[in-house]
Image: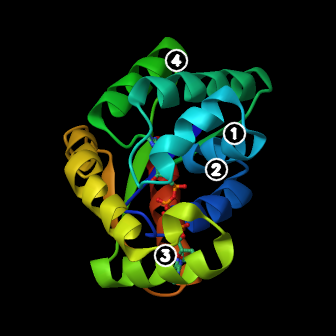
Amino acid sequence: MLNIILFGPPGSGKGTQSAKLADQYRLVHLSTGDILRDEKRKQSHLGREAKKYIDQGLLVPDEVVIQMLAKWIDQNVRKGCRGFIFDGFPRTIAQAEALDRMMEERNMQVDIVFSLEVGKQELVTRLSERGKISGRVDDQDEATIQKRIDVYHDETAPVAGYYKSQGKLVKVKGEGTIDVIAGQLNSHIEQLQEETR
Ligand code: B4P
């Protein structure tokens, strides 16, 4: 199994790069943002709860996201998947600890954590651009985008230290063309696969 985490601020390219990696290595792409937005669209109980946080640029409570993710992992493991790309999860230390527990209980492990490094102005530009077409409430105004970047620095950035101390964190420049960034991620994965062969 190959399990990868894509980590970075909002708009850093996590979703974009995860889709490419999932396709290339035939992994299951688990985007907590996409799952929560889908629940919002369906107006399920979870979706209505999540909406209160997402639309304001805040994180959905840990226990909600952790339970939701455990369910998705189990469903895909039962189907015999080759591994996962975690996109937008974990976003807090509590989520990172929960993921480690979930993996251990299932005899799995996180193999590599990519941190996509992008400057703040570029993030604001990308998300504002996406806001014109995505219809996402959290991309619509600059104050909410700013709030998400602040939440990232306060609550999510410390997760990088958690994986650095496990020797799993790899920083990658997230500015440049999508294909060049994808090429860098690929070469790190191939190196990892060489080392573990
Ligand atoms: P997410 O759906 O994870 O979305 P995101 O952080 O806004 O964006 P992402 O980083 O995936 O976007 P991408 O770069 O692909 O989260 C949304 C919300 O859901 C959170 O604020 C939170 O409320 C909630 N949530 C999700 N997970 C949670 C969790 N674990 N715990 C609690 N709450 C959670 O794309 C951005 C734009 O940049 C795109 O338009 C793309 O085309 C463009 N782009 C990408 N790469 C580019 C490049 N190299 N050059 C130029 N443009 C590029």
For the residue with label 3, is its CB less than 8 Å from the closest atom of ligand 1? yes
Q: Which residue is mark 1?
A: 39
Q: Which residue is mark 3?
A: 127
For the residue with label 2, is its CB less than 8 Å from the closest atom of ligand 1? yes
Q: Which residue is mark 4?
A: 107
Q: Which residue is mark 2?
A: 34
Residue drawn where x is 77% and y is 27% of the image: 80
Q: Disc 1 or 2, which lies upstream in sequence?
A: 2
Q: Position of residue 51 (x, y in %)?
A: 56, 44
Q: Disc 1 or 3, which lies upstream in sequence?
A: 1
Q: CA distance from mark 4 to mark 3?
A: 37 Å
Residue drawn where x is 59% and y is 27% of the image: 68
Amino acid carrying mark 2 in the image? Asp
Amino acid carrying mark 3 in the image? Leu
Position of 173 relative to 31 (above/below): below
- Report the number of discs: 4
Amino acid carrying mark 1 in the image? Glu
Q: CA distance from mark 1 to mark 2?
A: 9 Å
Horizontal side, residue 57 vs residue 133: left or right = left
Dividing the image into 4 quarters, which one contains the N terminus? top right
Q: Disc 2 or 3, which lies upstream in sequence?
A: 2
**In the foreground, 155 or 158:** 155
Q: Are marks 1 and 3 in contact (CB under 8 Å)?
A: no
Q: Residue furthest right?
A: 79
Position of 148 relative to 94 (above/below): below
